[in-house]
Amino acid sequence: MRSATSSGANYEEACGAESKADFIHKMQLVLKELRESLYWLKLMGRAKLIPTEDLQPLQREAKILHFAIFIFHCFLNPSPCVKEPL
């Protein structure tokens, strides 16, 4: 729960950024927290803590959010975007 809400909180902080550099930094934090959310979802699936039919939509949504923010981040700051998204 914490990692999921952290990405949302960091996104809200990015919306109030004081500069482009501050915005980019905060969006990097959003990406980091989304990756952590995906990690925890993967672990919950492996441990069978959540039924697959409930887990898959959550994983799909987290991946879509990560990809969309990654593309947006690359548009703003292309130099570090040489890695492939998840």
Image (cartoon, grey):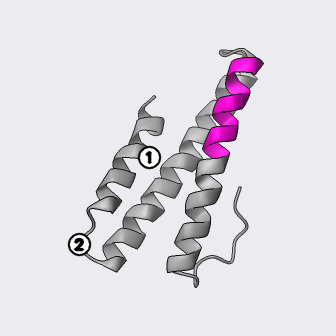
Secondary structure under the numbered disc 2 in the rendered image = loop
- The residues colored magenta run 52-63
Residue 53 locus on image (x, y percent): 75, 19
The spot of residue 73 in percent (x, y) is 53, 70
| As drawn, 67 above or below 60 | below
Residue at x 47%, y 64% (from the top left corner): 28
- The circle on residue 7 is 1
In the depicted structure, whether residue 41 falls above or below residue 16 = above
Q: Residue 58: horizontal and vertical position, in percent?
A: 64, 31
Q: Earlier in the sequence, mark 1 or mark 2?
A: 1
Q: Is residue 44 magenta?
A: no
**Front one among 40 and 55:** 55
Find disc 2 in the rendering and name its residue: 18
Q: What residue lies at 70% left-to-right and 39% top-to-bottom?
A: 60
Residue type, mark 1 in image: Ser
Q: Quadrant of the C terminus?
A: bottom right
From this view, report whether residue 72 is shown above or below residue 44.
below
